[in-house]
Image (spheres, rainbow, N blue to C red):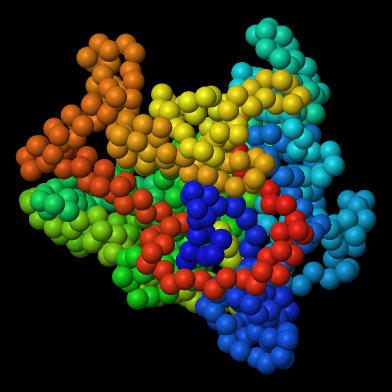
Amino acid sequence: MLNDADTLMPNDAFEPVRDRVDVSVGVLVRRADDVYRIAQVLDFESLIGVDVATGRSTALRIGDLRPLTRDRHCEQPSGMDMAEIADEDWRIAQERLAAIKPLLGRMHIGREDVELRGTELGIDPATLYRWLRRYNAYGVATALIPQKRGWKAGNSRIGSETDALIEQVIRDFYLTPQRPTAQKTVLEVLRACQAKGVKAPSASTVRARISQIAEKEQLRGRGYKEQAKNKFFPVPGAFPHADFPLAVMMIDHTPADIILVDDVFRKPIGRPWITLAIDVHSRMVTGYYLSFDPPSETSVAMCVAHSILPKEDWMLLHKVEAEWPVWGVPKTIHVDNGADFRSNNFQQSCLMYGISLEFRPVKQPRYGGHIERMLGTLAREIHALPGTTFSSVKDRDGYDSEKHATMTKSEFEEWLVTLICKVYHRRLHTTIGLTPTRKWEIGIFGNAEIHGVGVPPRPTNSLAILLDFLPYFRRTVQTFGVTIDGLAYYAEALRPWINAQDPETKKKKDLVFRRDPRDISTIWFFDPLLKHYYKIPLADLALPSMSIWEYQQARDKLKQEGIASVDEHQILRAITELRSRVDEAMEKTKTARRQAQRRKEHAKKISPAQPLPASSLPPKPLAPMGMDDLLDGDIQDFGDIA
């Protein structure tokens, strides 16, 4: 559901506040002008709150609640992003997160638990409490960065060549059965950098990179394969550490076994791709992404954002009257070794939210058994639909899939959401002995035998979460604006940053821009001083909305025509020509209809963060002026996580 935090300011600007509503008994929250203390959580939609002013109890919708305050101790470094955090500060943040990780996710943390953890690590309990408070306020690792030492202007990450050399040395030298020490690995990195003539990183940078290697990968790479197998091999029907909801989430892609038709002529256009995520503990589907585009970083970003965010508006979009009470940040995401999961942006985003990213061992399909079985269940249901391709040519023998195809993408997606929420979630799962919905409820609220983990904190800014997982770019701002992939973008929000210099390096300042590849007619610029995102359109407003794939297709066409220097007007002409050809061929060819349908889907600009247009939602009550003034003075919001 779109919150007041999601409603864009004039000039399409918004503040990426990443705080969450803690839905726990005793916590103070606000609804509009009133402050309540949570007395009892009834279910995933409602709770009982006590008005702190009147003492009266009342039923409250969880979706209407907002955090009361932001802890002044949680003040974040203003105006920077993940790319500008010093390596040493990032290492410290990861160490602090590791220190408090055993204490996270508990409904009640006793003084004895904190003191015991402090004794184990040699850390004062008051310090652990402070780190817990800072992390719980936002749920992101950057909350633990040292305030005085870190996030200074001018700090920057190592260059791409150096970064690649570190990765190569770790892969080819450190992760070998010879088991060289970290010190020898540092020396090998220095030697490789000297040989290549690139700037060498500090020893702490290399050690920090080694410390980020997953234990399973370390054991396997350094010759302890049997030990790794014994520790991480999942026994039948179980998965390591998936002991509660959102402990482990699995994601995978698959082409759906069905031919869909376009919206205009209702003729075949091909099979869509499904990116699906499930909670291993309960087998609940946490989120999905359906598209005619092949799997990519965007598919992963949309699926993860859909998993983390509440889904009330998503159900309204698809006109499905059912509950899908799943939201929250998972502890671990388990994926295969695809390039889309191994992108630096996705890995950084997971680190930002404290998500452990684990990769399925190569040629070990049993490690992905849970998601594979779910996709198999989905495939069997799809095989009953008109236009199915079945699972093989043999099964399809005598059946003309294209001839029987009748469903559009929208109709299929409505069917998919209905299947997930009304059938799969409510059907007995033989492995766990319960329905996924009931298993999820018990894991959250508990029963006579199990102590539930409580309702996950509810995100308050959906667009910020989506942008955190989308691809980003670093660019300087010129007099004409900023250029990405040969396209110029400009808006008044960029004017103060034209030819801006870094005060320490005296070089032009790199700034962070994020982009949804499905529509590159606009990008999001993060202003490091105002700590807001601004939507920046193409400088040439005559250019149409287009996806990155459509733009690349137009560039390729111009190259084939022998045009060495490509400008935006030529791009416009090429896209217009390509679209004309598609429109002419739509009724004749499946490829053209599929391309036209892709363009139509991109133009809808539907995402898990904004499934419904703002105009279709009722206005939200505004917070009292006094409360807003107090909150703004208490804390500065941290910036983009790039």
Q: Going 65% across and 60% down the picture, which residue do you hit? A: 19
* Foreground pick, 618 / 149: 618
In the image, residue 306 above or below residue 153 = below
- Position of 15 with respect to 593 (left or right) is right
- Position of 464 with respect to 389 (left or right) is right
Q: How many marks?
A: 0
Q: Is residue 597 visible?
A: yes
* Foreground pick, 314 / 614: 614
Q: Going 67% across and 56% down the picture, which residue do you hit? A: 139
Q: Going 59% across and 52% down the picture, which residue do you hit? A: 16
* Foreground pick, 297 / 451: 297
In the image, residue 599 above or below residue 455 = above
Q: Position of residue 49 (x, y in %)?
A: 65, 84
- Position of 460 with respect to 569 (left or right) is right
- Quadrant in the picture for residue 427: bottom left
Q: Is residue 237 visible?
A: no
In the image, residue 245 above or below residue 502 = below
Q: Going 68% across and 92% down the picture, which residue do you hit? A: 56
